[in-house]
Image (tube, rainbow, N blue to C red):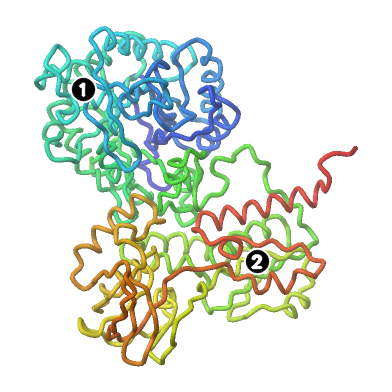
Amino acid sequence: MAYPALFQPFSIGSLRLKNRIAMAPMETHLGNPDGSVNGEVIAYYSERARGGAGLIMTEFTCVDGTDGFSSNVPQLRLDNERYKAGHAQLAAAIHAGGARAVIQISHAGRQTKESVIGTTPVSASAIPLRSIYMSGAPRALEDHEIRRVIASYANTARLAMMAGYDGVMLHGAHGYLLQQFLSPLMNHRDDDWGGDFERRLRFPMEVIKAVKAQIGDKPLLYRMSVVDGVDGGLTIEDSEIIAPRLVEAGVDAIDISWGFLECPDLILEPMSIAEGDRLPYARRIREATGKPVITAGVMRWPDKCEQAVLGGDTDIVSLGRALLADPMWPIKAQRGLAHEIRPCTSCNWCIRELGQSRPVACAENPRCGKETDPDIGSFGAGLRATVVGGGPGGMAAALMLDQAGFAVTLYEKRQRLGGNLITSAVPPGKDKLFWYHAFLVRRIEKSGVQVRMGTVVDQETIGADLPNVVILASGSRPAPLDLAAWGNLPTAPAYEVLIDEMRVPPSSAERPIVIYGGGETGTETAEHLAKAGHHVLLVTRSNAKFLARNAEALYRMHLLRRLSTNAAIRILDHTKLHAIDGEHVVLAASDGTLFDQPAAAILLAHGLVPDTTLADALADRDIPTISIGDAAQVARIGEAVRDAYRAAQDLRRLITQPEPIAC
């Protein structure tokens, strides 16, 4: 068995786990609108239980329908008998998959909206919330309301035991109500529930005691932000004092986390954060309490997890986004197949989807959140498929059609598979995307897909293949750009630099590389060139505050911070590119004034449009043709892979059941 420490049985109190791998609690938006459990929720958790995790910690479940819901709905709830049956089915399904089930219970406090709960949000104090995700002003809970909320926690714990859960976790992290009482940043009371350390601690302690009274010898876990992450908030030194007090009140294990909603990049680290960044904090809490600790964060590979357990940093490794990407992570690790794990790259596409009130999804695992879909099956046996474009969408489509039994030919115009996956991985801090690139290439090499590199596909190529279906993943091209003059200054699309198809000439502060376009490609190319020693002038038509406006929010926070402090990058906003000359570019200020800017080269990042050349040429052919990814709509890696999955499922339905009804 590989990774013997990770797969050694472990106990939290009376609860025996088959290994030291847990699934972190993560919201899904898969439940019914009323907060009840449905088949989609059960299928989602069942798949991860069958994947080999020893412990499944279900998503935050509301304890009080009066004012406890989060702003992200639908949120599961268990605040009265009506919801018990669904949770009983969920707990039973997790057990059937071979895992133990712990329910996380939560009250949102101020982290909700009046439009969701129908009243003003509540908190320890009336401290306004200011986050990239929401803003608002809560009111302070009164004493009798606080006691009602404590009773609500206890009631949910009671119902959870009746539903068959093996334990309960209190969500005391990420700015929810328990942390709102505990943190000096959010609790400004001067009564029995706040005013000094002991009184701020009272609410969590009372909740712990009330819940423990309901669950008996079943384990009580507490998810704790061991640092608030903001000046004046709780520090790790504070938490080393707080955690033992929580244990005295009845907590059996601490789940280590960071931050609250004002600093969401601590809760859900962006791609640039290294693996295991929370482990030193976990070790300190473990030593302070003498109780088991569970550690989440950026834990992506079995080697790192094994070292964390062996080294005494943590007792249990909690996999969150990693199990969205690959529910089979534990089984693959146990069998020594770590190279077969579909990697989580911390791209946070999942967070973007949830933030837009859509169900949970993963950029690299298109089945995530769609576990009730039928398997792809072998509907393509005896048929041929041509896939044009070897980017992430094209590779995913080729692999799924190969899985379905098609004889697949994958064409790529370059000499390397990857396309926009490579351009996305090259900029500083995004190298984790190369994990996914390597995974797809390995899968292609082991599959039956025939790959044709360095081939530009036209109608004749398609005709010679005699395919039964064509998938166009041919990507995008630069949007039209109307300039007064196109001189002989070195000019290329910015992505050609990232994919290493353009040699960038030497530059200087007086004659920089000019990048036109302040979107994600333009800003990332600027940072990439600056790291390589170039001087860059980034020109954008918009206000500088809108740079990389479509980038994932948490990654964008860090990107803008780096851009603003990079001495090699100068940003010129409210400016248009008017013309290109041999020695300079001509720029137009917002008032129309033209001025020359010496330049070593001009890189265009003003926008992309789908490349429909081949789709247009095939429009009259009697061949089912499906455009995916940027060839359909310029978007992100996740959309391209999801398009590939939808194409495979649509073809399955078309071929196996061409008519939905017989009448």
583 left or right of 330 in image: left
Q: Position of residue 359 (x, y in %)?
A: 52, 38
Quarter the N terminus occupies: top left
Mark 2 nearby-residue class (10 Å; few <14, some 14–19, many ≥20)? many
Residue at coordinates 24% horizontally, 31% vertically from top-left?
128
Q: Quadrant of residue 406?
A: bottom right
* Proximity of marks 2 and 1: CB atoms separated by less than 8 Å: no
Instruction: Report the residue at 25% width, 38% height from top.
Output: 259
**Amino acid on which disc 2 is placed:** Leu
Quote the CA–CA distance across marks 2 and 1: 55 Å
Query: For this rendering, which residue is in front, 505 or 344?
Result: 505
411 to 108, vertically: above or below: below
Q: Is residue 508 left or right of residue 575?
A: left
**Tag 1 residue:** 125
Instruction: State which tag comes first along the sequence, 2 or 1.
Output: 1
Q: Residues within 10 Å of mark 1 (few under 14, many from 20)?
A: many
Residue 302 percent across, percent down from the top left? 38, 49
Left or right of residue 13: residue 88: right
Comparing 499 with 257, the one in front is 499
- Residue at 49% over, 60% down: 439
Q: Nearer the viewer, residue 507 or 5?
A: 507
- The image shows residue 329 at horizontal and vertical percentages of 47, 46
Nearer the camera: disc 2 or disc 1: 1
Residue at 32% x, 20% y: name it. 220
Q: Which residue is mark 2?
A: 472
Disc 1 element: loop
